[in-house]
C-alpha cells in the first residue's frame, strides 16, 4: 500500500510535466491542425536555457533560491517563447495553405535542426545540475517502507495546477482566448470578422512554448540531468498524452499527461522498467483503436 | 522618360534600403534573444560541476549573419515581385517536367555509375560504405513512397519494418546458418507479416491518429529490440558471412569481413538505436 502511494506520487509528478508539454501540442493541433514535432525540442531548449541561467546566476552571486528560481523561470519562459515564435515564423507560416504534409515534414526538419543546433552549441555530453531543492516530507514511516513526498514534487504539482488554472481562464475569458477558439473553429470566418489570424497562431505557439519552458525547467530540477536528445522522447510521450486525452482538448491533454505518467510509473514499479515506453504506447494504441477521438475529444469529421 | 524615372528609382532604392535595414534590425534583435544564451554561453565540464564559457564573438557573428541575410532577402523581395502560388506552381511544374525528361538519360548514366562504384573504388572502404548507405536509403524511400505517397497513409513508424527486416535477417543467419539468398526473402516475409499484423488494428484510424499510432509502434519495436537482442544498443555480433560472391575480396560492399567492426553495412540496421535514429532523421519521419 505504501509502495502504491509512493508510485502514485511519482506518477502524478511525471504526468504533470507531460501534461504541460502536451498542452502545446494540443493547442497547435487545435488551431492549425498540425503536429508540431519541434515542440519536444523547444522543451529541450528550455531545459538548456534554465540550466545555463542557473549557472550564470550562480556566477553573478544570486543564490537566494526563491529569487533565483523566479528569475530562471522568467528567463526560460521569455527565451523559449522566442524560440516557439521563431519556429512558427520560419518553418510553418510560409507553408500555410500548402498541402497537408508540408508543415509536418517541415516540423520534423525543425526538430532535427534544433537537436543538432543545441548539440553543436552546447556539446553532446549530458549536463548535470546538482539538486537545488532538497528534502521533503516523509510519512507513514515503517520499518520496511517510507513514503517520501519531496518539496520538488510539491513544487511541480502546485506550479502545474496554477498554470493550468491560469491558462484555462485565459482561454475561456480573455479576448485572445476567444480569438483562438474562433480560429480553431473556422479560420477564414475568423479572418473575415477582423481577427488577426497570423498573430493569433503566433501567440498560440508562444503560449505553448512558455508552458513547455516551465516543463523543461521542472524536468531539469527534478531529474538533474539533461542532454540535447531529451526532447525527442518527452515530445512523443507528450504528444501521446495529447492524443490519449483527445487532441484539441485542453483538459484532455492534462488528463492524458497524468495517465501516461501514471502508466509509466506503475509499469516501472510493478513490472519492468525497460518496457515502460512499450506499456505507454500500447495503451495508446488500444485507446485509439476503441475510441479514436481520445478520451475527452470530439469525434472528428473527416475533411476531404 | 528614362531620365525622369532614374531619380525616382534611386529614391525608391533608398527607401528600400531603409525598410530593409529596419526589418533586418528587428530580425537581428530576435536572433540576439535566441542566440545569447544557447549559443553565447556554453556549458563546459570543469572541476566540481559545470562551468560557463562566454562566447560573445560567436553571438555577434550569428546576429550579424541574420542581419545581413535579412537585408539581402528583403531587398531581393522588393526588387523581384514574389510570385503568387499558382505562378510558382507553374514554374515548379515546368522544372519538374524538365528534370523528368533529362532523368531518362541521367538515370541510365547513374545506373552505370552505381554498378561501377564498387569496382572503381574497390580499395576505398569509405566510398563503398557511403554508396551502400545511399542505396539503402533509396530502397527505404521507395517503400515509404508506397505507404505515404501512393496509399496516403502517414506512417511514421515505417522504420520499424527496416529494423524488423534487419533483425530477422541477422537472427536467421545467426541461429540457422542459412545463406544470404535464403535469409533475404525470409527477412522480407517477416517484415511484411509485421506490416499485416500492424495494419489490422491500425488501419481503422485515419490521418494524424494513424501517424501517432505508427510512431508509437516504431518506438515499441525499437525498445523491444534494444532490450531483447542488443545488450544495451551494441547490435548483434557481426558473425554473419554473406557469401554472395564466393571468391570476392573482403572489401566488396556486400561481403563484410567478419573482423571487429565489420558487418557494418547491413548490421547497422540491426542496431535499433542507429536504425531508429537514421529513420527518425532521414527516412521515416522525413
Image (spheres, coloured by chain):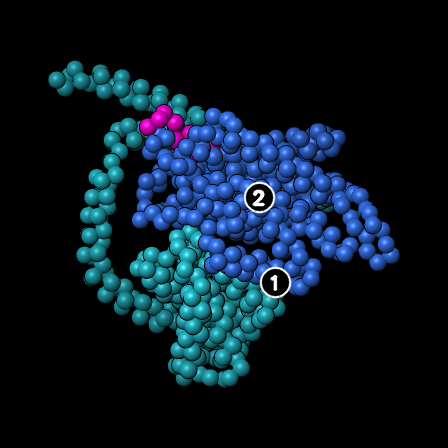
> Depth check: B71 or B163 in front?
B163
Which residue occupies the extreme right position in the image? A143
Span shown in magenta: A192-203
- Residue A200: say if magenta: yes
| Colour assignment, chain B | cyan
Question: Which numbered circle lies on residue A254?
Answer: 2
> Depth check: A137 or A247 in front?
A247
Q: Earlier in the sequence, mark 2 or mark 1?
A: 2
Return the residue at label 1.
A275
Q: Residue at x 42, y 78 (%)?
A: B186
What subunit carries mark 1? A
User: What is the secondary structure assignment of the residue under circle 2?
Assistant: helix
For disc 1, the neighbor class at 10 Å (few under 14, some 14 to 19, many from 20) is some
What subunit carries mark 2? A
User: What is the secondary structure assignment of the residue under circle 1?
Assistant: loop
The chain shown in blue is which? A
User: Quadrant of residue B201 in the image?
Assistant: bottom left
Residue A98 spot, x, y in % from top left: 32, 43
Judge depth for marks 2 and 1 and give the one in front: 2
Residue A56 against residue A33 in the figure, above or below: above
For disc 2, the neighbor class at 10 Å (few under 14, some 14 to 19, many from 20) is many
Q: Residue at x 67, y 57 (%)?
A: A266
Residue A204 spot, x, y in % from top left: 47, 35
A38 displayed left or right of A6 = left
Residue A50 spot, x, y in % from top left: 62, 38
Magenta portion: prevailing SS class: helix
Q: Quadrant of the N terminus of chain A?
A: bottom right
- Residue B238: say if magenta: no
Amino acid at each position: 500500500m505504501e509502495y502504491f502511494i509512493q508510485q502514485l506520487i511519482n506518477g502524478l509528478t511525471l504526468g504533470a510535466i507531460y501534461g504541460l508539454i502536451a498542452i502545446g501540442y494540443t493547442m497547435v493541433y487545435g488551431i492549425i491542425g498540425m503536429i508540431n514535432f519541434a515542440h519536444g525540442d523547444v522543451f529541450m531548449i528550455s531545459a538548456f536555457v534554465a540550466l545555463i541561467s542557473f549557472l550564470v546566476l550562480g556566477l553573478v552571486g544570486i543564490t537566494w533560491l526563491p529569487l533565483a528560481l523566479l528569475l530562471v523561470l522568467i528567463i526560460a519562459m521569455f527565451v523559449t517563447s522566442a524560440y516557439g515564435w521563431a519556429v512558427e515564423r520560419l518553418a510553418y507560416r510560409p507553408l500555410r495553405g500548402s498541402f497537408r504534409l508540408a508543415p509536418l515534414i517541415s516540423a520534423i526538419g525543425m526538430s532535427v535542426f534544433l537537436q543538432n543546433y543545441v548539440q553543436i552549441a552546447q556539446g553532446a555530453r549530458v549536463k548535470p545540475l546538482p539538486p537545488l531543492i532538497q528534502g521533503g516530507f516523509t510519512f507513514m514511516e515503517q520499518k520496511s517502507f517510507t513514503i517520501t513526498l519531496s518539496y520538488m514534487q510539491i513544487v511541480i504539482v502546485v506550479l502545474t495546477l496554477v498554470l493550468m488554472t491560469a491558462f484555462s481562464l485565459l482561454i475561456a475569458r480573455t479576448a485572445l482566448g476567444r480569438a483562438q477558439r474562433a480560429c480553431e473553429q473556422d479560420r477564414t470566418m475568423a479572418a473575415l470578422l477582423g481577427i488577426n489570424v497570423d498573430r493569433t497562431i503566433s501567440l498560440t505557439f508562444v503560449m505553448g512554448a512558455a508552458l513547455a519552458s516551465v516543463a523543461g525547467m521542472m524536468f531539469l530540477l527534478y531529474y538533474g540531468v539533461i542532454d540535447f536528445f531529451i526532447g525527442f522522447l518527452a515530445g512523443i510521450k507528450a504528444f501521446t498524452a495529447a492524443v490519449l486525452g483527445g487532441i484539441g482538448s485542453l483538459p484532455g491533454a492534462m488528463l492524458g499527461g497524468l495517465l501516461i505518467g501514471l502508466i509509466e510509473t506503475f509499469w516501472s514499479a510493478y513490472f519492468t522498467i525497460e518496457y515502460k515506453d512499450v506499456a505507454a504506447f500500447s495503451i495508446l494504441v488500444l485507446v485509439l483503436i476503441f475510441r479514436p477521438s481520445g478520451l475527452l475529444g470530439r469525434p472528428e469529421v473527416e475533411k476531404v | 522618360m528614362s531620365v525622369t524615372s532614374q531619380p525616382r528609382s534611386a529614391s525608391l532604392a533608398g527607401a528600400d534600403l531603409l525598410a530593409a535595414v529596419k526589418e533586418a534590425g528587428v530580425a537581428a534583435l530576435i536572433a540576439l534573444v535566441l542566440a545569447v544564451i544557447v549559443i553565447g554561453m556554453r556549458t563546459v565540464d570543469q572541476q566540481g560541476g559545470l562551468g560557463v564559457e562566454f562566447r560573445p564573438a560567436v553571438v555577434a557573428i550569428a546576429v550579424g549573419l541574420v542581419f545581413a541575410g535579412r537585408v539581402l532577402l528583403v531587398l531581393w523581395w522588393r526588387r523581384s515581385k514574389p510570385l503568387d502560388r499558382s505562378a510558382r506552381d507553374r514554374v515548379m511544374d515546368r522544372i519538374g517536367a524538365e528534370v523528368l525528361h533529362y532523368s531518362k538519360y541521367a538515370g541510365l548514366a547513374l545506373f552505370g555509375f552505381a554498378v561501377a562504384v564498387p569496382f572503381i573504388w574497390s580499395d576505398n572502404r569509405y566510398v563503398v560504405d557511403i554508396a551502400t548507405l545511399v542505396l539503402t536509403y533509396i530502397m527505404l524511400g521507395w517503400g515509404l513512397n508506397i505507404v505515404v505517397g501512393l496509399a496516403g497513409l502517414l506512417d511514421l513508424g515505417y522504420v520499424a519494418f527496416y529494423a524488423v527486416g534487419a533483425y530477422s535477417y541477422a537472427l536467421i543467419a545467426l541461429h540457422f546458418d542459412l545463406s544470404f539468398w535464403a535469409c533475404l526473402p525470409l527477412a522480407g516475409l517477416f517484415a511484411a507479416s509485421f506490416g499485416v499484423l500492424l495494419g489490422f488494428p491500425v488501419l481503422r484510424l485515419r490521418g494524424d491518429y494513424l501517424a501517432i499510432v505508427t510512431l508509437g509502434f516504431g518506438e515499441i519495436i525499437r525498445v523491444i529490440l534494444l532490450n531483447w537482442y542488443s545488450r544495451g544498443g551494441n547490435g548483434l555480433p557481426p558473425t554473419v558471412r554473406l557469401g554472395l560472391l564466393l571468391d570476392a575480396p573482403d572489401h566488396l560492399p556486400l561481403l563484410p569481413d567478419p573482423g571487429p567492426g565489420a558487418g557494418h553495412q547491413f548490421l547497422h540496421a540491426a542496431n535499433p538505436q542507429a536504425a531508429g535514429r537514421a529513420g527518425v532523421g532521414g527516412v521515416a519521419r522525413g
